Amino acid sequence: MYRLLREHEQVRERRRLARHPARQRPELVADAPRQVYTWDITKLAGPVKGVYFDAYVMIDIYSRYIVGVRVHARESGPLAENMMREVFDVHGVPHVVHADRGTSMTSKSVADLLEDLQVARSHSRPKTSNDNPFSEAWFKTLKYAPVFPDRFASLTDARAFMAEFVTWYNHAHRHSGIGLHTPADIHHGRHHQVRAGREDTLATAHTAHPERFGTSRPLPKILDLPKQVWINQPDQEDQPQLQAA
């Protein structure tokens, strides 16, 4: 019976099922600061079980600089819009703002602001955290830090901690993804002087002890800056793809 039914294409799902179109994979590239910002919201445990604070964090994907951080007692589109306005006033308007598909990220207030400023909106695919890797990686850096507490005593306490941690991250943390520079050096264009100082120091050391260097290049590869930073870099044969411009 089933053989006959298959031959007549009768063995199939007969109910009317919703068919969701495939979401396009976001492919974004930046080759300088202030081109692509990505943002997300993470939960910070409050003083008692079941109480959480929401940390809004926006990152420049090229420099890894935290351009904006706010901690609120709730998540909402208008609060996200206010943060973006303040960030854009200080750091300039980017070409693209990327986020996941949370309610604040897709809210009308945020969409209207970005449309008014002619900023392209980009969103992750549903249930695909890898589409927002810079925010996810930074949240891991935050929550795995030895100084990160189990709970925050109050909203004021959470805000103070985040402000201090972001200051350290931006101005003291040597990031392996940007040539062991600090995010602030890259974001504000100071990395050229830092690199020149490194080259002078290494040249002096080479002159004093050439036997330690052999035929190695002047600066080790780990100190190189990336020419481009991608969210979902396409295969080489598919480039060029979406540019952040």
Image (cartoon, rainbow, N blue to C red):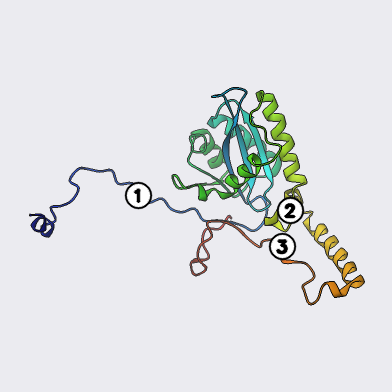
Q: Nearer the viewer, residue 190 or 219?
A: 219
Q: Which residue is mark 2?
A: 186
User: Residue at coordinates 73% horizontally, 53% vertically from top-left?
Assistant: 186
Q: Nearer the viewer, residue 245 or 5?
A: 5
In this rendering, would 33 be left or right of 238? right
Mark 2 residue crowding within 10 angstroms, few (<14) / some (14–19) / many (20+): many
Q: Quadrant of residue 143?
A: top right
Q: Are marks 1 and 3 in contact (CB under 8 Å)?
A: no
Q: Which numbered marker is on residue 222? A: 3
Tag 3 secondary structure? helix
Q: Which numbered marker is on residue 21? A: 1
User: Residue at coordinates 54% horizontally, 29% vertically from top-left?
Assistant: 76
Q: Quadrant of the N terminus?
A: bottom left
Kind of residue at disc 3? Ile
Q: Nearer the viewer, residue 100 or 222?
A: 222
User: Residue at coordinates 21% horizontally, 43% vertically from top-left?
Assistant: 16
Is residue 100 in sight in this rendering? yes
